[in-house]
Amino acid sequence: MIGVETGPRAVVWRRRSLSLRVRLRTIIVCGVFCAILLALALLALCLGDLPLSVDEVASAFVGGSGGLVRTVVLEWRLPRVLAALLFGGALGLSGAIFQSLTRNPLASPDIIGLTAGSYAGGLIVIIVIGAGAGSAAVAGGAIGGGLIATALVYLLSYRRGVQGFRLIVVGIGVSAMLEALSSYLVLRAKLEVAMLATVWGAGSLNSVGWAQLLPAAVVILAVIIALGPLGGSLRQLELGDDAAKALGSRVERSRLGLVACAVALTAVVTGAAGPIAFVALAAPQIAQRITRTAGIALVPSALLGALVLLASDIVAQHLLPTSLPVGVVTVIVGGGYLVWLLVHEIRRRS
């Protein structure tokens, strides 16, 4: 039996023995996020060295525009826009998983060493193999580095389970060591290789085309599908290990699967576009404050992550005197948010 019930504050969807309850505020907020994303995507397709009207962009999709306009829209700008949406959503989702598991607003791939591990792995490929390393090899190195760093942090912080505070402290230490390793590699590399590594390390969508986007999209969508059965376990783990066990959840197995999904999302993005900092940290917390949910909601976090990255890319490309990598803008925005969050947490606990 399939049914949908609408209450004063929530929508309940039922199918046989399964039930899903979503607050009306969350649905409305997600709808607003989607509308803003559509407007920003259209704006990004119109802006550039060749300014285009909305009609010209729409015509390019249906084959009515000339060859140049169609090439600019579909081959140059569309992959970048889709990459910003997909990568931002993946980072927001990854941050939401980590913050839900640890029940700590500071838990994110940037803080616990995952991003630093992916960066170090990509640098090893770039510097050891050289400037001739292809994007697939760099992506593989970034994914491998992220997996190794996360496994190291997980093992070092494990003591009859993994606690959020211990995970963050160990992650900060591992991240510092990996950043030192990355600095050493760049300083020891040849000048042209070091410049290439530095550009990649800034986090940029400049080199993302269909060849880089499609494989990353397949992996990200596969991870999102794998997250489906783990969603209920995530909500149970938010209650604590003891409560989750009492509800029948396999705590360590579920936590390991969720961590693996979060690692894969961040590592794939880092491999394709370099380390883009602070999106995973800020998006879940801002989304939670807007939706006013008790815990971290995955879908709003993913949508807001996509919004932050796309808006930051528009600013980095078109609203500054010089075009900059998008990672520079997210660092500025995210750094300011991190300062506010730390001050807010200190005042709340004092």
Image: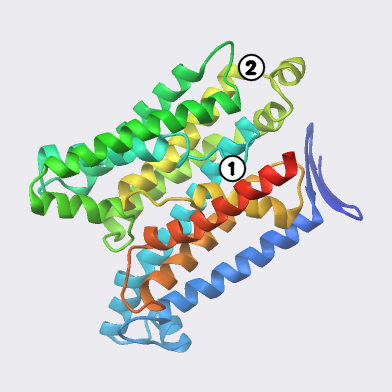
Query: x, y (%) of residue 272?
Result: 32, 50
Left or right placement of residue 197 versus residue 257 in this view:
left
Q: Nearer the viewer, residue 289 or 96?
A: 289
Q: Residue at x 90, y 53 (%)?
A: 7
Label 1, residues with CA under 10 Å away: few <14, some 14-19, many ≥20: many
> In the rendered view of the protein, which quadrant contains the N terminus?
top right
Q: Disc 2 and disc 1: Cα gap in Å?
A: 20 Å
Whether residue 129 is visible to the viewer of this picture, yes or no, is yes
Query: x, y (%) of residue 112?
Result: 47, 34
Outermost residue to the front = 350
Residue 151 position by quadrant: top left
Label 2, residues with CA under 10 Å away: few <14, some 14-19, many ≥20: some
Q: Residue at x 54, y 47 (%)?
A: 281
Query: x, y (%) of residue 229?
Result: 61, 32
Secondary structure, mark 1, is helix
Q: Which residue is mark 1?
A: 96
Q: Residue at x 55, y 24 (%)?
A: 166
Residue 219 position by quadrant: top left
Residue type for callout 1: Ala
First-in-chain label (2 vs 1)? 1
In the rendered image, the vertical position of residue 122 relative to residue 51, given as above or below: above
Left or right placement of residue 241 versus residue 278 in this view:
right
Left or right placement of residue 303 versus residue 335 in this view:
right
